[in-house]
Every structure is written in C-alpha cells, then in structure tokens.
Image (cartoon, rainbow, N blue to C red):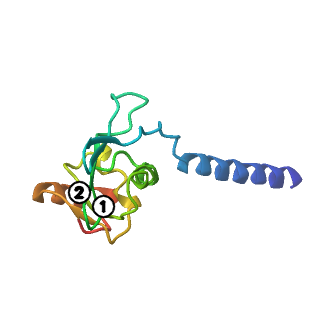
Amino acid sequence: MKRITVLGTLLVIGGVSAAIVAQQQPPRPPLPDLTKVKDNLYVITSSTPGPEFTGGNTGVFVTESGVVVVDTKLSGYGPTIIERIKKVTDKPVTMIINTHTHGDHTGSNDFFPASVEIVTQENTAENMKKMPAFMAASV
C-alpha cells in the first residue's frame, strides 16, 4: 500500500510538472529599438526567418490623439512594443492596423486593452474571426 501511495504521488507531481512546462513559452528573441523613419513615424524592424524571428515589421505612427500601431509581431511582444513606444511618447496606443492574418503580424494584439480599436481589411477580419486567438473578440 505504501508503494502505491508513493508511486501515485510521484505520478501526480510528474504530471503537474509536465503541464507547467508545456504551458510556458520559450523566451523570445529581443526586439530592436524603434527606428525613426520621419517626424512622428517609427518602425520596429523584423528579423530574418529562423530561430531569431520576431515577426514582421511593426509601424508606429504618433498622432495628436494617440499612437497607431501597424502589426503587432508574434505573440508575447506586446509589453516590449509598449516599452519601445514609451521611449518616444507618453501617448496611449489607440489603434492597431493589421495588414493580414499571419501570426507574426497579429500575435500580440491580445496584449492591448479592449479600448484599442483594431482595423483590418474586410477579408482579413473574416479570417481573423476564425482564428482561435480572435474567436472571443470582435475584430
């Protein structure tokens, strides 16, 4: 009986440990700083596909009323994108424009608050509604 209890305990601990490890995301490669393109227009560049891939280019347009972000890179980069934006303005992000549905362009949308307007082309919006990451949100 004692062996069964010990074996059961070990199996439970192993299962819980495996579940925790499976849920953790591997660390993402670092993003570069914003590059000024002109006046109030910046870009966070992409990287070449491979293990250091960060997603497509992210445009940052600072307007009088807030910041427009074009594409949000892969999942997990939302906090870093905000950190980079805060280096050039204290204005809030008010709009995200997604150029298309690929995860390296829409992956960090979910980090931004619901008050941020997400703009897409009609077909892109329909495709995004079918994606698990956007099923609960209206695009």
Circles 1 and 2 in contact, beta carbons < 8 Å: yes
Q: Which residue is mark 1?
A: 134
- Give the spatial CA distance, label 1 vs label 2: 6 Å
Quarter of the figure that contains the C terminus: bottom left
Q: Position of residue 80 (x, y in %)?
A: 45, 49
Are there few (<14), some (14-19), or many (20+) residues within 10 Å of tag 1? some
Q: Residue at coordinates 72% horizontally, 52% vertically from top-left?
A: 13
Task: Identify the residue position indicated by label 2 in the image.
Answer: 128
Tell me the amino acid under the disc marked 1. Phe
- What residue is shown at x 22% (from left), y 53% (from top)? 98
Q: Nearer the viewer, residue 86 or 130?
A: 86
* Horizontal side, residue 34 vs residue 26: left or right: left
Expressed as whole percent of the image width and height from the top left, the position of residue 49 reads 33, 29
Residue at the location (45% across, 52% down)?
83
Camera-nearest residue between 101 and 5: 101
SS of the residue under disc 1: helix
Pinpoint residue 29: horizontal percent, then vertical percent.
Answer: 47, 36
Q: Nearer the viewer, residue 21 or 106?
A: 106
Q: Which mark is first along the chain, 2 or 1?
A: 2
Relative to residue 94, is residue 59 depicted above or below? above
The furthest residue to the bottom: 115
Please state if 128 lies on the left or on the right of 82 as rendered. left
Secondary structure type for disc 2: helix
Q: Quadrant of the N terminus?
A: bottom right
Q: Residue furthest left?
A: 122
Residue lying at the far front in this picture: please name it: 39
- Name the image quarter holding residue 122: bottom left
Q: Quadrant for residue 12, please give it.
A: bottom right
Q: Residue at x 32, y 37 (%)?
A: 45
Residue 90 is marked as none
Q: The residue under label 2 is which amino acid type?
A: Met
Q: Position of residue 120 (x, y in %)?
A: 17, 58
